[in-house]
């Protein structure tokens, strides 16, 4: 968590189907269908709750995180039908944004 920005990040490197567990979120990716489907548990460490979740993927060519989409606080899944990078492994991260944050 970055205390200055009120953002909590969760990362996952994709293989077939994998889990990444931290103190408060679990991120799961299913690669069985046409697109990767990301599902995560809610981030629960903020008194005011979560405003939204940002989904990002690491772009190897740019060496930077690339925004994919946002969901509201009650939507904790995303089928990534937009990302089409020329790299063998995708590394996703989910960033929770604090409600009433800065």
Image: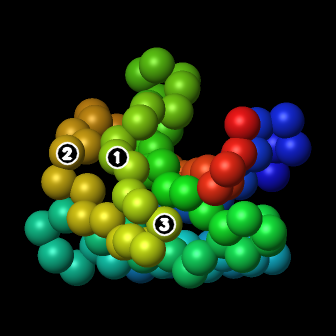
Disc 2 on helix, strand or loop?
A: loop
Q: What residue did someone put label 1 on? A: 69
User: Which quadrant would residue 16 be assigned to in this image?
Assistant: bottom left
Q: Residues within 10 Å of mark 1 (few under 14, many from 20)?
A: some
Is residue 79 in view? yes
Horizontal arrangement in the rendering, residue 8 relative to residue 36 (left or right): right
Residue farthest to the top, as pictured: 62
**Are the residues tagged 2 and 1 within 8 Å (C-beta)?**
yes
- Check contact, mark 3 vs mark 1: CB within 8 A: no
**Left or right: 99, with 87 as reference point:** right
Residue 38 x/y as whole percent: 38, 69
Q: Residues within 10 Å of mark 3 (few under 14, many from 20)?
A: some
Up the image or down, 87 lies above or below 16; here it is above
Disc 1, SS: strand
Q: Residue, x 19% and y 45% (percent of image)?
A: 82
Q: Which residue is mark 2?
A: 82
Q: Which residue is mark 3?
A: 73
Percent position of residue 80, x then y? 26, 56
Q: Nearer the viewer, residue 89 or 91?
A: 91
């Amino acid at each position: 968590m970055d205390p200055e920005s009120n953002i909590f990040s969760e990362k996952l490197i994709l293989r077939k189907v994998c889990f990444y567990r931290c103190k408060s979120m679990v991120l799961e990716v299913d690669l069985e269908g046409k697109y990767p489907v990301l599902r995560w548990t809610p981030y629960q460490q903020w008194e005011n709750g979560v405003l939204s979740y940002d989904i990002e993927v690491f772009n190897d060519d740019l060496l930077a995180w690339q925004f994919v989409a946002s969901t509201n606080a009650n939507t904790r899944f995303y089928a990534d039908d937009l990302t089409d990078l020329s790299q063998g492994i995708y590394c996703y991260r989910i960033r929770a944004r604090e409600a009433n944050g800065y």
